[in-house]
Image (cartoon, coloured by chain):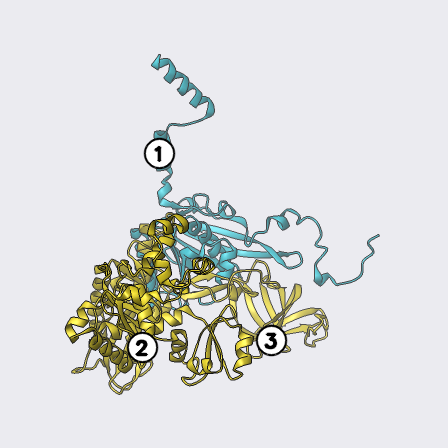
Amino acid sequence: MFYRGWMAVAGLAAELGVKPASALATALAGQGADRVLPVGSQLRGLLPEGLVRGSTVAVTAAGSGATSLLLGLVAEPTRQGSWCAVVGVPRLSLAAANSMGVALEHLMVVPHPGTEVATVAASLLDGFDVVAVAAAGGLAPSVSMQLSARARNTGAVLVALGAWPGAQLTLTVNEGVWFGRGRLRCRRLSVAVSGRGSAARPRTEQVWLPADPDVQQTLDQPDVSDASAGRRLRVVA
Amino acid sequence: MNRSLSARTMVVWCPDWPVVAAVLAGEAGATDPVAVLHANRVVACSEAARAHGVRRGLRKRDAQGRCPTLVVVAFDEGRDAAGFEPVVVAVEQVAAGVAVLRPGVCAFAARGPAGYFGGEDAAGERIVEQVAVQVGVEAQVGVADGVFAGVLAARAGQNIPPGHTRQFLAEVPVAELERPPLGDLLRRLGIHTLGQFAALPAGDVFARFGIDGALAHRLAAGLDDRPLQVRQPPPDLEVVEEFDEHPIERVDVGAFAARAMAVKLHERLAGHGLACTRLEIAAVTVDGQELYRVWRHDGLLTATAIADRARWQLDGWLTKRRVTSGIMRLRLSPHGLVRTGGLQPGLWGEAGPGRERAHRAAHRVQGLLGPDAVLVGVPGGGRDPDQQVTLLPFGDEKVPARPDGPWPGALPPPHPVLTAGQEPVQLLAADGTDVVVDARLQMSAPPTQLRLPGKTAAVGVTRWWGPWPVDERWWDDTTSRRAARLQAVLEDGTAVALAQTGGRWLLVGLFD
């Protein structure tokens, strides 16, 4: 009786695609879910496995777009309860961060670390999950390597704004194209991914930052309300 | 004579207390005719106003009609209570177990002071003198059996001998029971004094008027057996340290002293099961300068947090403000007290080990660079992105500068990722003239080029949107702001936010 009942449950589970809890645990351990911070769906193409704890990610740009990409990277982790600090970006607008989905209650900024950038970053790497560092004058390669090593030891993610010698992954914004309708709406960035390990083969991805799904869907249509096209009366009937 | 169950009670009554409190608070002059109004009715008036015919219960206009020079003060329960505190303290120096009945009236058991000063009258005189000397307030003392009779005795300024309370109350009108519906009803039944009321059989009074009537009946009969609700003096939580011998002149010395004081304060608070959310630091220098600052905190202040704040404050005073002489006296007083455990940490995310670790790291950086080095953003409201988030030092109370709410005219996202320093830029039309937006939001010509600060060559403007107006706080000359905002994409692919104010274009933000 009991045996038949169990068989029925197992059969039903297989039919519904339900796995026992033990199977789920091994699947997660295999991917190392606790070793990875998630990234938003926007950036899945860029970082398929998310932000790996202990790694260093460098964000650079040929023109503009590096700061937006940085905010895009930290948005999802802060929403999931990870703590994030940004060091040495004095003019970072937290309103923009907020509108890009960063949970401000999990974000702290150190706008003016002065000459103590390395010390501050090292202290923050002990406690925060993601630490973004912009060194105004650049850091000595040995100091950069030490900070990367610190991140590796503490399991934090070091995001460097600018070139970084010890980075596992470098994201370079090559080009950004703005789209607007009535006002600025969204921007298509083409980002080159290069680095070590699985990212050794360079590739280029398209990322929308900031994103605006409504406008992105209708980009094929001409932008009729574009003010710079001139404000003339048009024949409508 | 039936034996009274009530304890001998001494009552201190300050006449016209709301008026006295207003005078003490500096809202009226001591000799002015003053009336305190609540809901447009006079609740108390001064002697000078009474001489002009102002009475309790008068409407404001009637009162002012009778006394044109009347100073009208709004009723404030908090002011009355706060003003009465020094009086209670003065009374407490003479008598123990003082109960505040309401602001202006306090009571205590007469036995102790009467025994000590050799009689109830002597004790009463001593207390009136004490209050007059310490606070400068006129008071009257009355002694009777029970609190109810005691208050009436104090208003009459009488000492009712033991057992004579019932006779004393007999001629008092029933309105003094302070139960208006009952007093009204009794009067209509032909019962005008407490003596007449007390003469009724207790059982019948209970049957007719219910439990509250029965209670009033006992009061009228002088059988007031309610115990006094004795005030618990607030615990002294301040930590004060004197440095007469060696005034603090160096930050490290001060930090060392402050750490010991912080631990002491924290232990004292913990001993009462309390924790504080605000810390007041006050110092007196050798040459008599008084320094003062309140630190706000968004959680409970730990011993380390208290010590840190004291150290930062001393650092600020001794090095930045260049205090000319050493600090002689340092005082830490806790404010915003809550019961420990009264502040619940959140369930998800904001609490937990990750939060603790992050906060410790932030504290370390604050220790390294100073309290203002680590900032957190608090979302609020505003028309411009840089107003919408208030940057506050980590650890401060999270209060946005502007409240959230509808802010008509605010631009929707995306916002500029980097704020620019409001540097002047030149927005040029095709013919090389400056583009101007007039009061009707008409642009003189479409912009084609932008000259950024510090650059000689202008960059072409490929597309632009706007202008959108802001006209804020026009009623205030000092903070009013008028601007026209514009978004533009430049030839090199960057996007900028511009604002024209006072005829000049400023670079507001960069969409990096």
Could you classify mark 2 by the number of other residues whose Cα lies within 10 Å: few (under 14), some (14-19), or many (20 or more)?
many
The residue at which mark 2 appears reads as B139
Q: Where does residue A24 sit, x and y in percent of width and height?
A: 38, 32
Color of chain B here? yellow
Q: Where does residue A73 sit, x and y in percent of width and height?
A: 46, 52
Is there one chain holding both mark 1 and mark 2?
A: no
Quadrant of the rendered image containing residue B270: bottom left
The residue at which mark 1 appears reads as A25
Disc 1 vs disc 2: which is toward the camera? 2
The residue at which mark 3 appears reads as B475
Q: From mark 1 to mark 3, how far is it between C-alphas?
A: 64 Å
Could you classify mark 3 by the number of other residues whose Cα lies within 10 Å: few (under 14), some (14-19), or many (20 or more)?
few
Q: Chain of mark 1?
A: A
Q: Chain of mark 2?
A: B
Q: Which residue is pictured at 65% across the width and 70% down the height?
A: B449
Q: From mark 1 to mark 2, how far is it between C-alphas?
A: 78 Å
Q: Which residue is pictured at 25% across the width and 73% down the height?
A: B91
Disc 3 vs disc 2: which is toward the camera? 2
Q: Is residue B187 left or right of residue B385?
A: left
Color of chain A here? cyan
Q: Chain of mark 3?
A: B
Contact flag, marks 1 and 2 (Cβ < 8 Å): no
Amino acid at dot 2: Ala
Quadrant of the rendered image containing residue B276: bottom left
